[in-house]
Image (cartoon, rainbow, N blue to C red):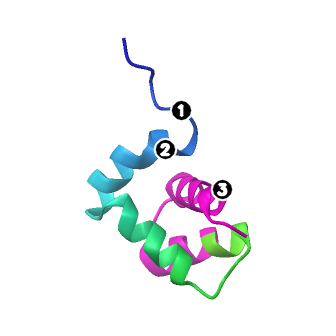
Amino acid sequence: MTDAVKGPASYFPSIEKKYGRPVSEWQDLIRASPLTKHMELVSWLKGEHGLGHGHANALVAHTLAETPK
């Protein structure tokens, strides 16, 4: 039996399907952005790339959690 994906990563399949880009590309964009604060990045993804709030939030949360400080 496999465990269901939980947390922000649970959004990844629908993000890839809806926006046509792999999650790794979104994470590269987030890491390359000069913005560093969570909500700044969420707003940027929503405004510049047309992501919904939940999808943008999930990508930012997951990326910032795994990026060394």
Q: Main secondary structure of the magenta part?
A: helix
Span shown in magenta: 42-69
The vertical placement of 62 against 7, above or below, is below
Give me the C-alpha separation between circle 2 and circle 1. Answer: 6 Å
Mark 3 burial class by Cα count in 10 Å: few <14, some 14-19, many 20+ = few
Mark 1 burial class by Cα count in 10 Å: few <14, some 14-19, many 20+ = few
Q: What residue would you read off at disc 1?
A: 6
Residue at left offset 48%, top offset 81%: 48
Three-letter amino acid code at disc 3?
Ala
Give me the C-alpha separation between circle 1 and circle 3. Answer: 14 Å
Question: In the visual, does 5 lie left or right of 17?
Answer: right
Q: What residue would you read off at disc 3?
A: 65
Residue at left offset 38%, top offset 53%: 15
How far across and down, in percent of the image, does residue 56 sit?
A: 54, 61
Which of the two discs, 1 and 3, labels the residue nearer the N terminus? 1
Q: Quadrant of residue 61?
A: bottom right
Q: Which mark is residue 9?
A: 2
Q: Residue furthest top?
A: 1
* CB atoms of marks 2 and 1 within 8 Å: yes
- At mark 1, the secondary structure is loop
Mark 2 burial class by Cα count in 10 Å: few <14, some 14-19, many 20+ = some
How far across and down, in percent of the image, does residue 8 sit?
A: 55, 45
Q: Front-most of 65 and 51?
A: 65
